[in-house]
Amino acid sequence: MHEAIKALLNDAEQRMKKAVEATASNLAMLRTGRATPALLDHIRVEYYGTMYQLKQLATITAPEPRLLIIAPWDKSLIDSIQRAILGSDIGLTPSTDGNVIKVPIPPLTEERRHELVKLTNKRAEEGKVAVRNVRRDILEELRKLEKEQSISEDEVRRARSELDKITSKHIDEIEALRKAKEQEILEG
C-alpha cells in the first residue's frame, strides 16, 4: 500500500477513535438513576480567582448507587462547590456536614427517562456525524492524490474500501455505547 494512503488511513483511525472517546465522555455525563463521579465532570469551581474542574479540587466517590460523596482537599471550598452544583444543569441538591458534601441522586421519572434517551440518541448521532466527517475529509484527500496522479484508481478503490471498514467499526462502537447508555437509563 502506498505510504500516503497508509498515513491517511492511520489519520482517519486516530480521528475517529477520538470521536468515539468524545461520545463516550458525553454519554457518561448524562444522569441516570445511578451515582457516578462522571456526573460532576463538567462542574467548575472558582478557587483563588481561577476556575477549576471539581475533580481537580476534591475526591468524588459513589459509595452507594444513589449517593455521591465529595471530599474537598480544602474545606473552605465546601460552599463554593455546593453553589457550583446548584447552579449547574444537572438538577441535584447537595448537602454538607462540614467535612464532605453529599449529593443524593433521586430516581428518574418516566418523563425524564424519555428525555434522557432522546438526548442519548442525539449525542450518539453527533458522534456518528463526526466519524462520517472524518471519512469525508479522507476521501477528499484521496481524490486529490488521484488527481495529482500520485496514486492509481485501484489504490483509491482499495483505500476507500479500507476507509469504509474503519468507519463502520467506529460507528458500531458509538452505537454500542448508545445502546448501553439507553439500557442504563431505562433500568436505572
Image (tube, rainbow, N blue to C red):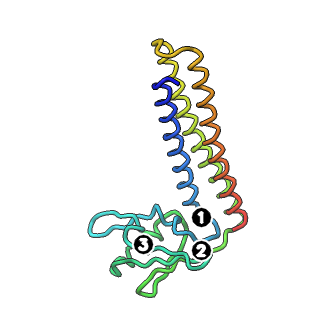
**Disc 1 versus disc 3: distance between alpha carbons?**
19 Å
Badge 1 or badge 3: first in the primary sequence: 1
Q: Are marks 1 and 2 in contact (CB under 8 Å)?
A: yes
| Residue of label 1 | 31
Extreme left residue here? 48
Give the class, few, some or many, for how many residues have Cα within 10 Å of label 1's Cα (few <14, many ≥20).
many
Viewer-nearest of discs 3 and 2: 2
Picture mark count: 3
Q: Nearer the viewer, residue 146 or 32?
A: 146
Badge 3 or badge 2: first in the primary sequence: 3
- Which corner quadrant of the image does residue 111 belong to? bottom right
Badge 1 or badge 2: first in the primary sequence: 1
Where residue 47 sits: x, y (%)?
Answer: 31, 69
Q: Identify residue type, mark 2.
A: Ile
Q: Which labelled disc corresponds to residue 105?
A: 2
Q: Nearer the viewer, residue 77 or 128?
A: 128
Q: Identify residue type, mark 3.
A: Arg
Q: On the picture, is 120 further left or further right than 100?
A: right
Q: On the picture, is 151 further left or further right than 76?
A: right
Give the class, few, some or many, for how many residues have Cα within 10 Å of label 2's Cα (few <14, many ≥20).
many
* Residue at x-position 43% and y-position 74%: 59
**Quadrant location of the C terminus?**
bottom right
| Residue of label 3 | 83
* Residue at x-position 61% and y-position 20%: 157
- With respect to residue 89, does 149 lie above or below? above
Q: Are marks 1 and 3 in contact (CB under 8 Å)?
A: no
